[in-house]
Amino acid sequence: MSVLDDTRQLLRDLISYPTVSADSNLGLIKYLADHLHSCGARVDIWHDETGTKANLFATLGPERDGGIVLSGHSDVVPVADQDWSSDPFTMTERDGKWYGRGACDMKGFIAAAAAMAPRYARMELQRPVHFAFTYDEEIGCFGARALAAALQQRDLRPAVAIIGEPTMMQIIEGHKGCHEYTTRFTGLEGHGSRPDLGVNAVEYAVRYVAKLLELKAELQARAPADSRFTPPWTTINTGALVGGVAHNVIPGKARVDWEMRPVQPRDADYVSTALNQLCQEELIPQMRRTHPEADIHTEVIGEIDGLQPMDDNEARDIVMELTGCRHADVVSFGTEAGIFQTLGMSVVVCGPGSIEQAHKPDEFVSIDQMSQCLGMLERLSAKLV
């Protein structure tokens, strides 16, 4: 069988595991672990605290620093309320495309990397190649953060990471961070006719959102002059404001879901400081004059590091050579790449398929894109010997 045929079968099998982020990924991880172990790879599986999710880290080649990581996340987004033309967890092929949930985001790259493992295993590798497959990227990159901690404990220092998110095989050397929060307001319920006896959580939430809007405008003026992002500044989005039960009831609880996508770390610090000052010096003291137990609490849903473009980037240089592409771009969507960068690796994002297909019904990756990806990974062999 050709490597493309092997990849087709691997992808078919991977799609059959419904690894929606809310569910376990253990079946898929065991499948990949068995495949890589059969190739002679040294395989580690690290579970999360619940025991229902796991990261896989496998190595071919010598036990030393300086290796190249091929990375992808195993989880996919839900298919509920989406109008699919076929079973989303049964891969179908038509019009030169492979359809199924996760086909491009991002089981296509995982399948290609796994298909190359037997070929790498037959080589006299001088530089290790690592396979890193994570959980829960879609809901906060929790798996990648746990993997980073595990690698630090092992004192293992790979040099290069290629993150195979769908980029149409274009090289991405930078992306914004993504910080997601839920801020909860606890006031005091009461009758609408006596607002002086209650603490209206919704009204305080509205004042908080007003500050978010003020900061949103200020961040535009803080955009770096050389920013390559679209838009070039750090953005804030208020995703939801929820609270209240009836017209005549003072709401005792409210919730604001919001996110920030920093182009530079100091913008995140600026926003955090401003909001903390608002809550501690103004909102909470006012709330507690009526109800001492009133409070505002912000829960961190996820703080995903951005990928910072670097002048010296071995990963970018390698992938440019492998693909023939002479240009590296930046994007506004987030990936796990920044987490690998914090470990001291040079990192790029480059994988088959389009981000425009991700998360949508009838998600697909074209066979041409998969062939291009396999070509890149086959040419990577020359960097390993």
Image (spheres, helix red, strand yellow):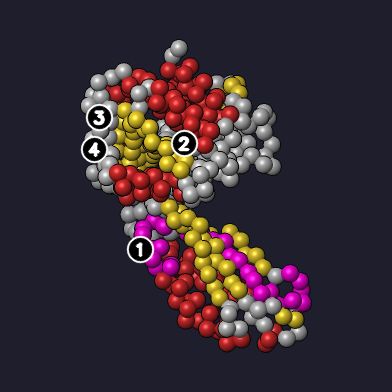
Give the residue at mark 1.
266
* 94 versus 177 height, above or below: above
Q: Earlier in the sequence, mark 3 or mark 1?
A: 3
Say which quarter of the image contains residue 357: top right
Q: Position of residue 276 (x, y in %)?
A: 45, 73
Tag 1: Cα neighbours inside 10 Å, few (<14), some, or many (≥20)?
few
Question: How far is the residue under mark 1 from the one under mark 2?
Answer: 29 Å
Residue 203 pos. (x, y %)? 63, 76
Q: Give the range drawn in magenta.
A: 245-272
Q: Can residue 318 be seen in this view?
A: no
Quadrant in the picture for residue 218: bottom left
SS for callout 1: helix
In the visual, does 41 lie left or right of 29?
left
Front one among 126 and 311: 126
- Pointer 2 or 4: first along the chain: 4
Q: Which of marks 3 and 2 is in front?
A: 3
Residue corresponding to mark 4: 65
The Cα–Cα distance between marks 2 and 4, rounded to whole angstroms, is: 28 Å
At label 3, which amino acid type do we have?
Pro
**Residue with the mark numbered 3:** 62
- Residue drawn at x 53%, y 79% as measured from the top left: 283
Q: Within 10 angstroms of label 4, few (less than 14), some, or many (20 or more) residues? A: few
Relative to residue 325, is residue 253 drawn left or right? right
